[in-house]
Image (tube, grey):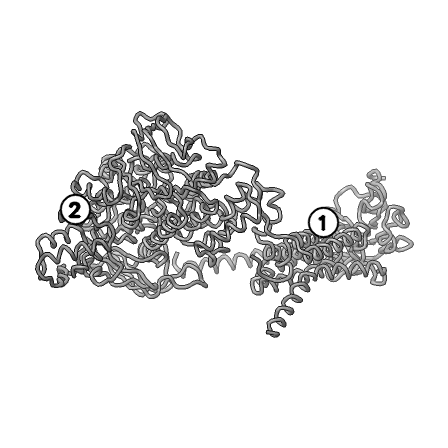
Amino acid sequence: MNSGFGLQRYHAAAAFMFFAAVIILTAVTVHPAYAAVSLIGAFFYCIILKKGAAVKFFLLFALPVIILFTLVNALSVSSGVTILFYLYNPVTLESIINGLTLGGVIAAVLLWFYAYGAVISPHRFLGLFGRVLPKTALVLTMSAGLFPRYKRRLKEVKRAQILIGKGGGGIKKGYRNLAALLSWSLCDGLETAASMRARGYGLKTRKPLTFKKMRASDIAVLSILTAFAAFLTAAFIAGAASFTFYPSLPPSADYSLFAAAVFAAFALFCLLPVILHTEEVLRWRTSLLKI
Amino acid sequence: MSKTAAKKFIALCAVTAALTAAVFFAACESEYEHPFSVTLSVTCTAAVGHADLPETVRALLPADGVILSDESIEITKKTSVLTLLRENLQQQRIQFDISGGYVRAINNLYEKQCGPFSGWVYYINGSLASSGASSYAVRADDVIEWRYVLSAPEFGA
Amino acid sequence: MADIVVKNLSFAYAGAAQNALHNISFTAAEGTLTLLCGATGSGKSTLLRHFVKELTPHGKRTGTLRYGDTEIVQLEPLKAAQKFGLVMQNPDNQIVTDNVFSELFFGLENLGFSAAEAHRRVAETVGFFGMESYLHKAIDSLSGGQKQLVNLAAALALRPEVLILDEPTAQLDPVASADFIAALLRINRELGVTVILCEHRLEQIFAHADQVVLLDKGQIAALGTPRELAAELMREPQLNKMYPAFPAAARLFGAVGGKGECPLSVREGRAFVQAFVKSGAEIHSAIPPKPATTPPQKPSVRLKNVYFRYESKGLDILNGADFTVYPGEITCILGGNGSGKSTALGVMGGVNCPHIGKIEILEKNIKAYKGGSLYKGILAGLPQNPETLFTRETARLELEEMGGDTSETQRIAQLLEISDLLPMHPLDLSGGERQKLAFAKVLLCNAQIYLLDEPLKGLDSRYKQVFGAVLKQLKDAGKTLILATHDIEFAALNADKCCICFNGELSAPLAAKEFFAGNYFYTPAINRIARAAGFNEVLSVEELAAKLRRKEFTV
């Protein structure tokens, strides 16, 4: 079942293509403006998807990364013509901007991954790849189910051990609890295997059933995204988004029309999920009003 | 330990620390009784117009290769060559990169940018110094020249 | 569709000295519901496994076990997987994926059904079970009963002709159990699927079986329709190990020496009682006897105004709970699944810390017990999952790690009838055996207060009597016993005080008779039968039989 708008609703292939492209492109970016726009796009999308939790994620992870990289770079790299102040070695503006860019790139990637988690659930992921890698897909589904169960069980083991006087901390006890969980779960695995075999697992090649057919709109969205991604990749390789920090930043007049066009395309690409999402929300709201 | 005993202990530690710091500073301020002057210059003539340099760095170098012309500096306390360089460059707002007692760059001209053996060295009174820049304390009337060389010349040349 | 015919089946596990099954012969006709029952170790699980090709145990086998005209072991694997569905005891372990939707598709994917066909079948199955509301939920968030229904649905999606079930309701509470059996009966009656299941708890299923096979030590001790079996066995109750498991109505029939058809369900039991009573004089409803006043004692466990929740944004599981328990008594906390019984025990045991409220153990604030001293001889707890206690290679080592000398270990092992289980690995034991071992470990803690969370899971009815006797011994020695359970029958027979956990609060513990007399349906079956004659406070078959025989009517 689908819930949500925009990328959450289209075929998982479109969403997957987008995230793969934007994450790779962002990761190879060295240009501060590109990093900034990717970060902004990612942040806005995360907020739309997860609201308060996204802000928390940003403050807890993304922002510290940016600050950390900026500080480390400013203090360790002293190249650059614009000296701001001296802290044993000079701290230059170029170095700070470099740090900001690095931090921004990593923060943007983090936020895109965060958004990915909200858009492509494990189930959708399997629907996409199940046919290609059926065994892996099944293992992933099983793990997704087992992980919360084992977390819960470990807590139970700890509590049970306390209640017979074998509680308390220490590595030895922790190890013993883990061992108890392990043997218990392995034993249960035997029953699961029996249940699977009784339902015919392993008899023929398993044919995972993907339930999403690609509709015309899905194909359209996928094509647009692929076109964007291809164009941007080519442009990047051609050096349209290159940047040098040291010893001085490139003068602003240095940008060709082509470079500006590539930047605009990248910005649009990063904002695409937000646009798709918001557009659909508005359409849905107005359609409700029409009733 | 009771609360009052802990308080006393902390007070004792604080007093000891303060006294130690005072003694330390006093020792550092080993002022010279008779201040003298030395001359400092920084040149990179060998690097000017070098083919290996990126365009942006080449544009930064002064045409005559003189980054810091002979400066007469008054020395009042024990100073190493490195400290001398650093303080003066800082005063003139010139970029440098010094790590671990070693000069990696001055004015955005980094070592190894003009060949694998290029870098910054200093000469005392015309001859290449043999000790590290942070261990040589300047003496009266020393002529200190920091030069960017393309390869490390023989010591004592 | 075909009959399943078992003829002269004998089986011994590889390397075992004795046969697990001797000369078993019976037929499960197509579309019927066959109930296999027997005490632990009678071989019913072993026999059941023979019906599923994939689970057939290895060993020496003679005799035949046919589905139609093919030996089950020789069935084509594809046919075997498709025609035979399996549901086992533990709801968690049979589930493969992380959500209900995929789980239902799992078998269909394995057998290579097309997307369209699979889609249709799953839609049908979901409709039949009414599962729409939790179809897309994560499986870990479902209750045990819901999970077991998912397992049943997943098996049914393959449209099997035979369903094999191994104690499917053993881990479920009575309500979930009733739901499951209702669904199973629908499948049998409306779809004509042959059902073979084995069960310990017969009250809910016995009357509905077409055929009952009673096993004892690997042999068929009795075979026939439920009514035939009941009538035959009620005549000689002492010879039947399974006697306590039989429906209360049947036991009552036997106890009063009834004639004619043996009643099996509560309804039939009530009719029987009324007919029996009509032949006598008029009746008056007995007034519940006043509970004997015990001299005031110091409470051993006390909860005052306890509020507890697991998650900061969640609901309060315990909502201002007040609760007092005294030593030398067995107190049962009853309540449905998820009502908070386990949480309450956790609070008493000091593993759940409430944000508001006070807990007193032996009149001392629980927080005053520092550094684990609470668990050294004061308090011990039996967890819901016995596996959480097992960390060693053999049962003997498990008991020995509790400290105490070998004579103590041996005494407890004998008391709980697990002496011959000692050399085995704890996880090689069956569910009921694990429960016994876990309880033995807890007993070796030599505590004053015992908190037992669902200690009766997987125990057969005969053992429950042993267990009840052990508890009585402990109680007489002045220990405090607090049980959280949904086994009303056991509570009715063994508890001194009962209370119910509901809406975050624990009701004040009442004497068992008073408690059940005041309830309408939360009572053991025999009580509901007894009300037909106006005896609202009767809690055991023996009691009611005595009253009927003596034609006791006034107080």
Q: CA distance from mark 2 to mark 1?
A: 98 Å
Judging from the image, what secondary structure is the residue with disc 2 in? Answer: helix
The relative height of residue C254 versus residue A224 in the rendered view (above or below) is: above
Residue C186 percent location from the top left of the image: 38, 51
Q: Which mark is residue C254?
A: 2
The relative height of residue C161 versus residue A249 in the rendered view (above or below) is: above
**Would residue C266 be found to the left or right of residue C149 on screen?**
left
Residue found at x 30% / y 29%: C23
Residue C39 percent location from the top left of the image: 27, 39
Instruction: Please state, as top left, top right, bottom left or bottom right, where the N terminus of chain C lies in the image.
Output: top left
Chain to which the residue tagged by mark 2 belongs: C
Residue found at x 37% / y 49%: C189
Q: Badge 2: how crowded within 10 Å, few (<14), some, or many (20+)?
A: many
Q: Is residue C555 visible?
A: no
Question: Which residue in the protein does label 1 denote?
Answer: B99
Q: Amino acid at mark 2?
A: Gly
Q: Amino acid at mark 1?
A: Ser
- Residue C423 found in image quarter: top left
